[in-house]
Image (cartoon, helix red, strand yellow):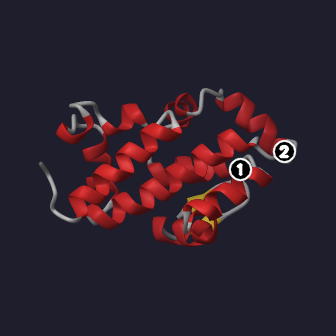
Amino acid sequence: MYQSEKHDFESISDLIVEYSPSIKSNIAIALEANKGIDAHTFFDIVKLSGYSKDEMAQVFSTSVKTFSRYEKENKKLGPLRSELILKIMALFKKGIEVFGSLDSFKSWLGKPAFGLGNNTPFSLIHTSTGIDLVHDELVRIEFGDLA
């Protein structure tokens, strides 16, 4: 069971289903990000990703302590952090679809990828552009374009 302060999930797929309306398209992500998302969503993405809180906090250039305080105060995150979290959630959804499992996708995230200039995909997800590059690489893999 995957738990956050606000949600209990039986599986990773349940967590993805919960957020599907917010990540179904770029326009949905933009609109949701503009409103701001609840800080507890950070802890949900930690559960989804399987990375530690500290590793994911570094991705967002924010401390775990700040996310915890925002969650305790029921604050929403600003549009930029909201967008990054939602885009990463969509990226994990796509990665699990392409690789068939979270473990396989995470393994790929940590290995240099030729199509990404031999950078590890995980090293690129700190920015919106980097997330887009990783997503585009997943689409190429999905359709067998590995050159």
Residue at the extreme right: 73
Q: What is the number of the mark on residue 75?
A: 2
Position of 142 relative to 92 (above/below) = below
Residue 19: x %, y % from top left: 61, 66
Position of 94 relative to 61 (above/below) = below
| Mark sitting earlier along the chain (2/1) | 1
Residue 69 appears in the rendering: yes
Residue 94: x %, y % from top left: 39, 61
Please name the residue shown 62% across and 71% down the image.
21
Which element type, helix, strand or loop, lies under badge 1? Answer: helix
Q: What is the number of the mark on residue 14?
A: none
Q: What is the number of the mark on residue 40?
A: 1
Q: Tag 2: residue type?
A: Lys
Q: Quadrant of residue 73?
A: top right
Decide: few, some or many residues near mark 1? Use Cα within 10 Å; few <14, some 14-19, many ≥20.
Answer: many
Relative placement, left or right, of 88 versus 106 is right
Q: Quadrant of residue 29?
A: bottom right
Which element type, helix, strand or loop, lies under badge 2? Answer: loop
Please name the residue shown 43% across and 55% down the image.
92
